[in-house]
Image (spheres, rainbow, N blue to C red):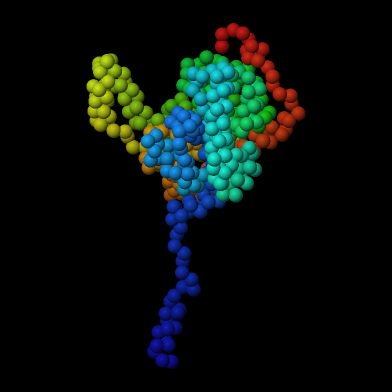
Amino acid sequence: MKPIVLAALFVAAATPAYAAKPAESPEARVERVLRTSPVIDGHNDLPWEIREQYDQWRKPLDLRADTSRLPAPLQTDIPRLRRGHVGAQLWSVYIPVEIRGPAAVQVTLEQMDIVRRMVARYPADLELASTAADIRRIEKAGKIASLMGVEGGHQIALSPAVLRTYYQLGARYMTLTHSANTEWADSATDDPAHHGLTPFGRAILHEMNRIGMLIDLSHVSADVMRQALQVTKAPVIFSHSSARALMDHPRNVPDDVLAMLKTNGGVVMVNFYPGFLSQPYRARMAARDAEEARIKNVFSGQPDRRKAAMDAWDAAHPLPPVPVSLVADHVEHVVKVAGIDHVGIGSDYDGISGTHPDAMEGVDKYPLLFVELARRGWSDADLAKLSGGNFLRALEGAERVAAAMKDEPPFNGTIEMLDGAGER
C-alpha cells in the first residue's frame, strides 16, 4: 500500500465519527426558553405614568418609540417589551390611597380606560386577555396579552358591585390594600387597625373567589396574608413582593407565609425595587430622608442652599450596588421555602421610576435575571415556570374555583351589616 494511502487511513481512524456540539451559552439558552415561554409580569405602573407625565395621553406619547429618552422617561415601551420577551403584562390601575369613595371609582375607571386605549392604539402588539387560555392564544399569535390589576381595596369604595364591575372591565386581580389600611384590611405599611381582615374583608375575598378574581397579597400586613390564605378557596398571588428573610421590609413575604403557598398553589412574583431587595440601599435612602429633613430646617426659605447641600450629600453618599444576582437570591429563597411552582416575576417597572437593580433599567432586561439563574444551574423547565408557567397555573386555579361557585348568589352586603357601625 502506498504511504499516502496509509496516512489517510490513519487520519480517518483517529478522527471521531462526529464533532461534539459546542455547549449552549446561558444567554442562548435563555433566548430559546423565553421564545417559547415568554415572561408574564405581574405588575407594571405605566398607566399611572401616562396619567401623571402625559396628562392621560393628552400629551404626545408613542409607545412604539424608545421612551427612555423622553424628557419624562419611562421604563416601558413596545420595542423593549419585545426585546424582554414579554408575553403578557398585568397593568396596574393604581390610584393614590388618599382618593376614596366615589372619586376612587371614577379615577380607577379612568385608569382602566388608559389601558384599554393603549391596547386599541397598538393592535399589532397588544391584545386584551381575560383568561389563561387567552394569554396562551395571544402569545402564540405573537402579541402581548394585556390584563389589569386593581392596586388597592380602597378602589372599590366598600362596594362589591364595583368589584364585580372592575372584573367585567378586565381586572383579574385586586391588591387588598396599598400603603394605608382600608376599612376592612390592614396594610403592611400602616399601623394595625384590624389585626388582619374584618368580616366584610373576608366576604370580599369570598366574592373574589366566586367571580374568579385573583387575590393579591402584596402591600398587606402579614396577618392579612395568613388570614387570607386560610379563607381563600383559590390560589393567591403576590403581584410584586420579595422575600422578607433576605430583606426585612414589611412589604416582603415572611417564610411562614411562603410555606403556606405549598398547599394554596399561589405565586410570589418577585419585585425589582432595590428598597425591597437590599438592606444597604434601604439604609442609605433612610439616611437621605433624615438629612433632607435636617437641611430643610437649617435652610428654611433658601431653596438654592437646600439643593446645593443635598447635591453635596448625594455625591458623598453614592447608592450602594444592587446587582441582578440579588434579585436572583430573592427568587431562589422563594423556591427554597415555597417550592419551584410558587415563584414568578412582578417587576414594578414604572412604579420604580428613577431606580432599578444595576443594568436592569427597563422591560428589556428580564433576560439578565434568567441568565443569572441559568448560570446557577436552573433547568429549562424551571426557567419556564418562573417566566410565566406558575402564574398561568394560579390563574387557571382561580378560574376552576369560580366555575365551581357559579351557582352561588352575588355578595351584596354592606360593611355596616357585617362589621357594625362602630369605629373601624
Is 415 or 96 nearer to us in this picture? 96
Q: Residue at x 43, y 55 (%)?
A: 25
Is residue 153 something that shows in the picture?
A: no
Quadrant of the image for the N terminus? bottom left
Q: Position of residue 137 (x, y in %)?
A: 62, 46
Q: Position of residue 106 (x, y in %)?
A: 57, 23
Is residue 194 something that shows in the picture?
A: yes
Classify 218 as above or below 358.
above
Quadrant of the image for the C terminus? top right
Relative side of 339 to 60, left or right: right
Of all residues, the one furthest to the right in this rendering is 407
- Quarter-of-image position of residue 235: top right
Is 261 or 82 nearer to us in this picture? 82
Q: Residue at x 57, y 44 (%)?
A: 123
Q: Position of residue 2 (x, y in %)?
A: 41, 91
Q: Position of residue 133 (x, y in %)?
A: 65, 43
